[in-house]
């Protein structure tokens, strides 16, 4: 068996692996990137980009369907499922093309195709497509193997009609009906988009979980907004049976209710691809899910010569986090070649999470559950705004949802927020930037607010928390000098 000797080996050529490669190359020329699947990254092929393309088509249909409320009359939109999927796939392929160009620009001798597994802390065995194996001996190894959908085994009863997000983006046409299991991030994005594109969508959840929320008030406002968006939604459904029937998948639920759908989409979470890497023989610190425990600032696993990044790390499974973690892991893998203790803390930004549904959902900094865990009740304050009567939101007929902001008593430090509402992707950025700058609520209120904008709703929530921190006056019900409806 041939053995390749390298300073740094990276498992996975996704976003994290590519970032790790570039960072490691700053320290040494001897780096290899190993890829078991297809190049192109999860984000571009089956994740961020195709999902947003589907959502864009759905939004277009929704706007036409609701134009009459503005006095703009139009026919109900005719959805051409084949044309929808054709655009999703062709634009997706364009994005994938950019990634492929970037992979192609990497020296061929730095790339290896095959499935990597650990033999020991410095040795990988790689199984190639033709079933041959080779070995890599590396001083430092970065695990950047991503994640995959995970679902309970009873879903397998749906047989060939059980699908995951990857399969949706392979469709040539839209189906008539689907059941989405899991009203989390993927379930809400894909489920709502399909529903707006005329697919009959039924959503089944467990335990009342909805989107990324831990704040019961924000979750309740989001529940209200989503209540009439689907054929059926129950965030705490009792599913009795799932069966592949002649016509599709038959689901019996909530006692004697039954529905037959074309497909069951499993969106019940993802698991890191670390279970088949042979980690059990390496004496690494593992968590209860057997995922290596890495220092979030250095991405080093214990004091070992192994680093981890991206979804594989199970820290924050988002694209920008995969890029940041990959950079930190690759930099430290290369930097520590001479001395394993020479690792540096990289930049970890304030947390920001988005769901591109309508209303959009967002979390920033500490979520409500984190605040409650860290602080005594008396040591933090909450401010809120409902978007129901918020001026600009009403103007646009996007007046649903709620924003709640959390702050520290005494210092007035902004701690975090949860939001369901219009323009959340932009408001979440303002909040995340304020959070990273460690701004206080009074400092945030000193910033400019234009009129009439949705951000005036943010100002209302900030004023509310300011009053609850005893740093300012209580809110006046109709603050005319603030701008009508702000
Ligand atoms: C439907 C969907 C929508 C999403 N939307 C967003 C969004 O809007 N915004 C956002 O920030 N995030 C989004 N995400 C999350 C984002 O896509 C991921 O966080 C990110 O792509 C993870 O990158 P990664 O490098 O860790 O993994 P990947 O890009 O999956 O790369 C891992 C690579 O490792 C390879 N590999 C695995 N095991 C081995 C092995 N043993 N040997 C060799 N190679 C191996 C795999 O083949 C793969 O190519 C979405 C995800 C999904 C599924
Ligand atoms: N916009 C974005 O940034 C974006 C979009 C998609 C995915 N992602 C990333 O992908 C990750 C995974 O997304 P996800 O939606 O798969 O996971 P998730 O954790 O967000 O949601 C899973 C949902 O499934 C539910 N669930 C679990 N078991 C169930 C069962 N048996 N029946 C019904 N429901 C069940 C959970 O209660 C939860 O609501 C996200 O955490 C996120 O990091 C991000």
Image: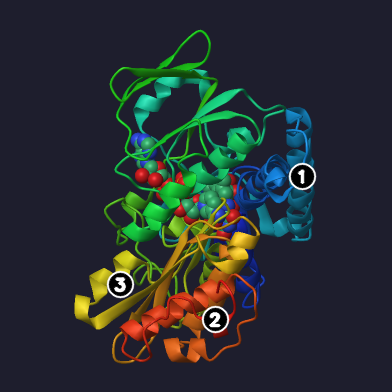
Residue at numbered disc 2: 480
Instruction: Tell me the distance, in whole angstroms, between the alpha carbons under discs 2 and 1.
Output: 51 Å
Q: Which mark is residue 250?
A: none
Q: Is residue 90 left or right of residue 438?
A: right
| Colour theme | rainbow
Using the rendered view, name the quadrant where residue 216 is placed.
bottom left
Give 450 or 214, whichever is nearer the viewer: 450
- Dividing the image into 4 quarters, which one contains the N terminus? top right
Instruction: Tell me the distance, in whole angstroms, between the alpha carbons under discs 2 and 3.
Output: 33 Å
> Residue 469, position in %: x, y?
32, 86
Disc 2 on helix, strand or loop? helix
Give 278 or 267, whichever is nearer the viewer: 267
Residue at numbered disc 3: 371
Which one is in front in this view, the residue at disc 1 or the one at disc 3? 3
Q: Is residue 199 left or right of residue 222?
A: right
Residue at numbered disc 1: 93
């Amino acid at each position: 068996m041939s053995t390749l000797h390298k300073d740094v080996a990276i498992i996975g050529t996704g976003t994290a692996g590519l970032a790790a490669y570039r960072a490691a190359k700053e320290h040494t020329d001897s780096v290899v990137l190993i890829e078991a699947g297809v190049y192109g990254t999860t984000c571009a092929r089956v994740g961020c980009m195709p999902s947003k393309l589907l959502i864009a088509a759905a939004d277009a249909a929704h706007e036409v369907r609701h134009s009459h409320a503005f006095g703009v009359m139009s026919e109900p939109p005719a959805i051409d499922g084949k044309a929808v999927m054709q655009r999703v796939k062709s634009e997706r392929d364009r994005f994938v093309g950019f990634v492929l160009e970037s992979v192609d620009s990497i020296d061929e001798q730095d790339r290896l195709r095959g499935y990597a597994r650990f033999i020991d802390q410095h040795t990988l065995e790689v199984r190639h497509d033709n079933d041959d194996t080779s070995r890599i001996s590396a001083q430092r190894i970065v695990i950047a193997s991503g994640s995959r959908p995970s679902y309970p085994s009873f879903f397998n009863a749906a047989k060939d009609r059980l699908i995951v997000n990857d399969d949706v983006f392979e469709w040539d046409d839209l189906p008539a009906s689907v059941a989405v299991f899991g009203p989390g991030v993927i379930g809400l994005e894909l489920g709502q988009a399909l529903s707006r594109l005329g697919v009959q969508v039924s959503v089944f959840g467990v335990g009342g979980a909805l989107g990324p929320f831990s704040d019961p008030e924000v979750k309740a406002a989001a529940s209200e907004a989503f209540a009439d968006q689907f054929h059926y939604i129950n965030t705490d459904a009792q599913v009795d049976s799932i069966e592949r029937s002649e016509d599709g998948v038959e689901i019996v639920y909530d006692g004697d209710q039954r529905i037959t759908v074309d497909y069951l989409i499993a969106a019940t979470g993802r698991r890191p691809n670390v279970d088949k890497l042979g980690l059990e023989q390496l004496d690494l610190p593992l968590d209860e899910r057997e995922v290596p425990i890495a220092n979030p600032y250095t991405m080093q696993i214990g004091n070992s010569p192994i680093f981890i990044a991206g979804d594989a790390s199970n820290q924050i499974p988002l694209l920008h986090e995969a890029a940041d973690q990959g950079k930190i892991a690759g930099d430290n893998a290369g930097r520590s070649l001479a001395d394993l203790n020479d690792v540096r803390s990289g930049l970890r930004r304030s947390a920001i999470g988005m769901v591109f549904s309508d209303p959009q959902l967002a979390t920033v900094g500490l979520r409500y559950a984190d605040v409650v865990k860290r602080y005594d009740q008396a040591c933090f304050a909450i401010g809120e705004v409902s978007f129901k009567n918020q001026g600009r939101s009403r103007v646009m007929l996007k007046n649903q949802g709620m924003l709640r902001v959390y702050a520290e008593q005494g210092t007035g430090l902004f701690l975090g927020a949860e939001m369901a509402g219009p323009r959340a992707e932009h408001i979440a950025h303002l909040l995340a930037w304020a959070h990273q700058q460690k701004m206080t609520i009074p400092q945030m209120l000193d910033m400019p607010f234009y009129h009439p904008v949705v951000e005036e709703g943010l100002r209302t929530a900030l004023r509310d928390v300011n009053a609850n921190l005893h740093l300012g006056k209580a809110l006046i019900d109709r603050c005319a000098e603030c701008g009508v409806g702000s």
